[in-house]
Amino acid sequence: MPPAEAAPALPKPAKSPAPGVLTLFFAFARMSLAGFGGVLAFARRGLVDERRWMTSDEFNEAFALCHFLPGPNIVNLSVVFGSRFGGFAGAAAAFAGLVGPPMVLVTALAVLYARFGQFELLRHILAGVSCAAAGLLIAVVMRMLRPLLERRDLTGLILMVAVFAAIGLMRWPLQAVLLVAVPVSLGITFLMRRKAPA
């Protein structure tokens, strides 16, 4: 009896063509308006899963870069992503789409909150929304972690756990941890790529 052949590996989904400036604006506007409790979850799903403008690894790398830059991470991501596909115009379109519509909505909500914020029901609603936001953030972290687990990147996982322990458990200052973690991470990556066969 001939040995059973291994099932062929499924091909990875092809990336979509580069978006235009108007498409960038509407895509980020949609993400920002859907992203109650945080846009990161919707940005990852929109850019990686739905539109396939980035791979999981590319999203993680871009988000890592934006995380170390000053300013809100998701705003940095919109500018980096937009400039990648449309230069300055793409960056401006993605930024405007991300910030513009929510700014109008939040201004209207702030007026309503100033008038009705003392009601107990509203406070309970906001407490529920904060729980949902925490759940969304945990879901995104787990999806961003998946490429490390699939590649069995033990070094990356150890660095991640070390940074989490330093900041989240030991309460060390973020800047001090990053001053050590970033050079160590870059050095390890450089050494690993030098040792990897061509």
Image (tube, grey):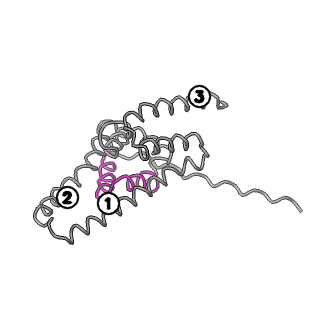
For the residue pair 57 and 82, the one nearer the viewer reads as: 57
Location of residue 164 with respect to 139 vertically, above or below: above
Q: Quadrant of the N terminus?
A: bottom right
Question: Can you tell which of label 3 and label 2 is closer to the viewer?
Answer: 3
Q: Which residue is the site of mark 2?
A: 105
Query: Which amino acid is tagged 1?
Result: Ala
Q: Dot 2: few (<14), some (14–19), or many (≥20) neighbours within 10 Å?
A: few
Marks 3/1: CA–CA distance: 41 Å
Q: Which residue is mark 3?
A: 191
Q: Nearer the viewer, mark 3 or mark 1?
A: 3
**Residue stretch in magenta:** 21-49
Residue name at image x 81 percent, y 60 percent: 4
Nearest the viewer among 21 and 43 is 43
Residue at the spot of label 1: 34
Residue 31 magenta: yes
* Label 1: few (<14), some (14–19) or many (≥20) C-alpha neighbours in 10 Å: some
Amino acid type at mark 3? Leu
Mark 1 and mark 3 in contact (Cβ < 8 Å)?
no
Q: Is residue 32 left or right of residue 7?
A: left
> Which mark is on residue 118?
none
Report how far apart the C-alphas of labels 3 and 2 lie in the structure.
48 Å
